[in-house]
Image (tube, rainbow, N blue to C red):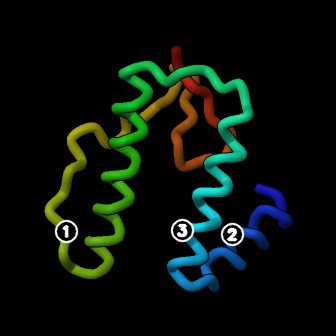
Amino acid sequence: MTATVQNILQSYELLPNLEKLELAAEIIRRSLKFNLPNLSDEGLVLNAEEIFLELDRREAKNGKSKSRRSMAGRSRIGGQGKTMSGVEHSISR
């Protein structure tokens, strides 16, 4: 991730919730212009798994977690060994 992107994300975190929602909606609207391939069912499941694992990490940090780590370690995209937690990832079709 470039320094520019990191700065944008840091600025985003400082915004009030309403402005965060407005910015997120605008980014999504603009992102629809890209010709991105559709995610496969497997890709969607792996993305959801990565989100749940992140929620588990946050809950564990706060002492509130009931683990959903059933697929931990298998969250790979496109068979290339890159997880969704990294910027450079592949989308499987």
Distance, label 3 to label 2, CA atoms, is 14 Å
Mark whose residue sits in front, 2 or 1 = 2
Distance, label 3 to label 1, CA atoms, is 27 Å
Disc nearer the start of the sequence (2/1): 2
Q: Is residue 31 above or below residue 4?
A: above
Q: Which residue in the structure is indicated by mark 1?
A: 65
- Where in the figure is residue 20, as x and y percent of width and height? 58, 72
Circle 3 residues within 10 Å: few <14, some 14–19, many ≥20: few
- Label ID, residue 21: 3
The kind of residue on which mark 1 rests is: Ser
- Where in the figure is residue 44, as x and y percent of width and height? 40, 31
Circle 2 residues within 10 Å: few <14, some 14–19, many ≥20: few
Of the pair 32 and 1, the residue shown nearer to us: 32
Of the pair 75 and 19, the residue shown nearer to us: 19
- Where in the figure is residue 77, as x and y percent of width and height? 51, 28
| Circle count | 3
Quarter of the figure that contains the N terminus? bottom right
Mark whose residue sits in front, 3 or 2 = 3
Disc nearer the start of the sequence (3/2): 2
Of the pair 18 and 42, the residue shown nearer to us: 18
Q: Is residue 13 left or right of residue 79?
A: right
The kind of residue on which mark 2 rests is: Leu
Q: Secondary structure at mark 2?
A: helix
Q: Is residue 7 above or below residue 55?
A: below
Q: Which residue in the structure is indicated by mark 2?
A: 9
Q: Is residue 26 left or right of residue 73?
A: right
- Where in the figure is residue 28, as x and y percent of width and height? 62, 49
Q: Is residue 23 above or below residue 25?
A: below
Distance, label 2 to label 1, CA atoms, is 26 Å
Circle 1 residues within 10 Å: few <14, some 14–19, many ≥20: few
Residue displayed at 28% across by 81% down: 62
The kind of residue on which mark 3 rests is: Leu
